[in-house]
């Protein structure tokens, strides 16, 4: 586990370093986060997450897509595996605090968190590890707390656009190329998403695939009932 965690952290540190302002893909990704994902994140966090209490983006990255999440009476925490990306976003909205931690061992007491959200995180964990992450989110949630998960499906727009580019570049360079660390756990359907929430002990409330975020994610909402 320690070796796997170190390798994963190194992969994500390298990914965030590659997305600097001079990179074409970095600029494009930044535009998508600001123009497409920000309104969707605000909509879902307004609709499903508590208006007060501790709310955590579990795998926040740059936090750019979440910059307009409403604070109000909430205490917003940005949590990520990669310390460099957390340091790069110091002082930027929306978080009150940024925390470096592993999603499989969250630094929160049982029932301490009012809600979680994230974008493009769980597809990077093998299915068994993904369930462990969801179970850990459930542990930290208070009863009635909810998790809003923007989870890319195998049929999402980002895959349709990026997969051919990755394939062509891999052939041209004779070296496997991916824009992101391996995505080993993309969802195949809404039914699979709901079943995954249920398997982790969360009551499925929604499984949306809509133009609100340009069909990039399947947005799952799960609730801790007890």
Image (cartoon, rainbow, N blue to C red):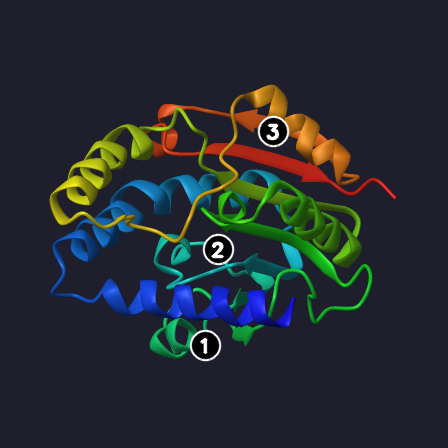
Q: Quadrant of residue 24?
A: bottom left
Q: Sequence-wise, which precedes: disc 2 or disc 3?
A: 2
Please state which of residues 130 and 170 is positioned toward the viewer in this rendering.
Answer: 170
Residue drawn 36% across and 73% down? 89
- Mark 2 closeness class: few <14, some 14–19, many ≥20 residues within 10 Å: some
Disc 2 to disc 3, how far (Cα)? 26 Å
- In 3D space, how far apart are the residues under numbered discs 1 and 3 (Cα atoms)? 30 Å
Residue 9: x and y, percent? 48, 69
Q: Circle 3: is it few (<14), some (14-19), or many (20+) Cα within 10 Å? A: many
Q: Read off the residue under disc 2.
A: 70
Q: Secondary structure at mark 2?
A: loop
Mark 3 — residue? 193
User: Where is residue 137 shown, x and y percent of the image?
Assistant: 70, 53
* Point 69% across, 35% down: residue: 197
Lower sequence index among marks 2 and 1 = 2
Q: Quadrant of the N terminus?
A: bottom right
Count of residue discs: 3
Q: Confirm or deny contact between disc 2 and disc 1 (CB under 8 A).
A: no
Toward the front, the furthest residue is 174
For discs 2 and 1, the disc positioned in front in the rendered view: 1
Between the residue at mark 2 and the residue at mark 1, the CA separation in whole angstroms equals 24 Å
The percent position of residue 125, horizontal first and vertical second, equals 56, 49
Horizontal arrangement in the rendering, residue 157 relative to residue 111 (left or right): left
State which tag comes first along the sequence, 1 or 3.
1
The quarter of the picture where the C terminus appears is top right
Q: Secondary structure at mark 3?
A: helix
Q: Which residue is mark 1?
A: 83
Answer with left or right where residue 9 lies relative to residue 105. Answer: left
């Amino acid at each position: 586990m320690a070796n796997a965690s170190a390798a994963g952290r190194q992969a994500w540190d390298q990914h965030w370093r590659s997305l600097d302002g001079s990179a074409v893909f970095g600029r494009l990704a930044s535009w998508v986060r600001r123009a497409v994902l920000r309104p969707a994140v605000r909509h879902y966090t307004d609709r499903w997450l508590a208006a007060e209490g501790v709310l955590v983006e579990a795998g926040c990255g740059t936090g750019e897509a979440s910059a307009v999440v409403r604070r109000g009476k909430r205490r917003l925490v940005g949590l990520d595996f990669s310390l460099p990306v957390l340091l790069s976003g110091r002082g930027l909205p929306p978080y009150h605090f940024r925390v470096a931690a592993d999603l499989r061992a969250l630094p929160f007491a049982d029932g301490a968190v009012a809600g979680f959200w994230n974008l493009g995180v769980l597809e990077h964990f093998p299915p068994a590890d993904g369930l462990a992450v969801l179970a850990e989110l459930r542990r930290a949630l208070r009863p009635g707390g909810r998790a809003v998960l923007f989870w890319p499906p195998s049929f999402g727009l980002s895959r349709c656009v990026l997969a051919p580019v990755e394939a062509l570049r891999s052939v041209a360079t004779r070296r496997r190329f991916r824009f992101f660390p391996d995505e080993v756990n993309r969802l195949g359907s809404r039914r699979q998403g709901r079943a995954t929430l249920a398997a982790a002990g969360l009551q499925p409330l929604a499984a949306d695939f809509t133009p609100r975020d340009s069909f990039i994610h399947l947005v799952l909402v799960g609730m801790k009932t007890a």
